[in-house]
Image (tube, rainbow, N blue to C red):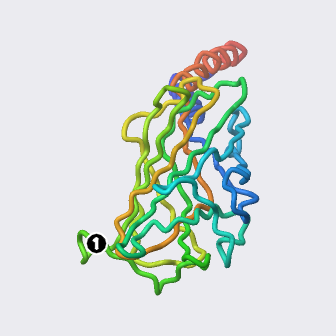
Amino acid sequence: MFSPRYFLACTLLATTAASADITLTTTFGNAAQTAPTAVTLTNTWSEGANLPEITGSITALTNSNGNVNLQTSKDAGTDASVLTPNSNVGPTGTPPTAYPWTLTMAYSSGSAAIEPEIASITLSVVLFNSSGAYQTESATWTDPNNPGNPGYIDFSANLTSGDITLGTCTGRLIMEHGQGKVPFSVTLTPTSPVSLDDKTDFTVSLELTPALSAGTFVGLNSISYTLVPEPTTALLTLPALGALLLRRRRRA
């Protein structure tokens, strides 16, 4: 015979399991060439996620001068799994000018709707120089508006579906020095809830706003979307669980 406490414990476990966060990770391929739209995106759900297959593509990579190609030299530029916009996001030239880039990616699940809400976006970021070599610890940056503080880059991911604005996630990378091939992890969180709300496609526009005393180039190893299933997903498990436990109790 099952006690009310047992029933409650199982209910809480089922609710927690059903509402556990899941992750969609985007990695890059064929990136050791100049055309960003020719880069392939591989999208992988975390283990156990019962969600539709997602396809994706890069639709644009731009800065204030127009379209941006990829760096194809040295370390970062010859790694086909690293997206390497050839655009200096820190001040360079005379007068010093920065060229932060904007990356636009389109995702689709075909005819199957996506339900979860986006809880955060994590970027795996690498820094490299104009020749494609990774920035080592000898490269340092300060905030030009506050010279005693390290430089930083603000990231903003704007999500849309057609003409519908889904929301924005923001985060900051504090840059004291380079760290070679080892990537920085930058977490972007929603400024308000971002729900995919049964969408079958969505677009992500990733923008940079730097505050740097010197130049650098910014690349991406991967992008991970942490999603939380809609509350109804968890609630739907409760009647089934209750029926199962009641049946077992009667048999006992």
Q: Is residue 56 left or right of residue 176?
A: right
The extreme bottom residue here reads 138
- The quarter of the picture where residue 16 lies is top right
Q: Position of residue 218 (x, y in %)?
A: 52, 66
Q: In this orientation, which residue lies closer to the viewer: 233 or 43?
A: 43
Which part of the image, by quadrant, shows the C terminus? Answer: top right
Give the structural element (helix, strand or loop) at label 1.
loop
Q: Is residue 202 visible?
A: yes
Q: In this orientation, which residue lies closer to the viewer: 51 or 238?
A: 51
**Count of picture labels:** 1
| Residue at figure coordinates x 59%, y 19% from the top left | 236
| Residue at figure coordinates x 45%, y 50% from the top left | 188
The extreme right residue here reads 30
Q: What is the crowding at mark 1: few (fewer than 14 residues within 10 Å), some, or many (at least 20)?
A: some
Q: Which amino acid does label 1 sit on?
A: Pro
Q: Is residue 112 left or right of residue 164?
A: right
Q: Name the residue under label 1.
A: 144
